[in-house]
Amino acid sequence: MYWQVRFNRENPDQKVIDEMHEIRKVHKDYGCLRMTRELRARDYLINLNCKIKLDD
């Protein structure tokens, strides 16, 4: 096969996703810009172009 999904690999962004869920619990109205600023304030190096879908 040309391309296969590798489910046995750990997601490298899982720490960031967990932190985003914690921020979302406290600040439900935060959008992309505020979420990025909050993550940077918590010492995560994240780009504004990083799009991670949160399933709430």
Image (cartoon, grey):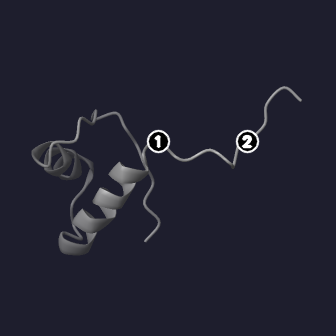
Query: What percent of the width, then of the height, locates residue 13?
Result: 42, 45
Residue 14 vertical placement versus 46 (above, below): below
Q: Is mark 1 on a helix, strand or loop?
A: loop
* Residue 21 placement: quadrant: bottom left
Q: In this view, does 26 lie to the left or right of 22?
A: left
Residue pointed to by mark 2: 5
Q: In the drawing, does residue 25 fall left or right of residue 55?
A: left
Q: Give the vertical position of 28 relative to 13 (above or below).
A: below
Residue 46 circle label: none
Residue 8 point in image, percent of width and height: 68, 48
Give the residue drawn at x 15%, y 42%.
43
Local crowd size for mark 2, using a 10 Å CA cut-off: few (<14), some (14–19), many (≥20) = few
Mark 1 to mark 2 CA distance (whole Å): 15 Å
Name the residue located 71 percent from the left edge and 42 percent from the top edge: 6
Q: In the picture shown, does residue 12 fall above or below 55?
A: above
Q: Which residue occupies the foreground of this view, 11 or 46?
A: 11
Q: Quadrant of the N terminus?
A: top right
Residue 39 at what x, y percent from top left? 20, 48
Answer with mark 1 or mark 2, whichever residue precedes in sequence: 2
Disc 1 residue type? Pro
Foreground residue, 48 or 17?
17
List the residue tagged with mark 1.
12
Q: What element carries label 2?
A: loop
Mark 1 or mark 2, whichever is nearer to me: 1
Q: What residue type is labelled 2?
A: Val
Q: Do the residues labelled 1 and 2 touch (CB within 8 Å)?
A: no
Residue at (26% x, 73% y) in the render: 25
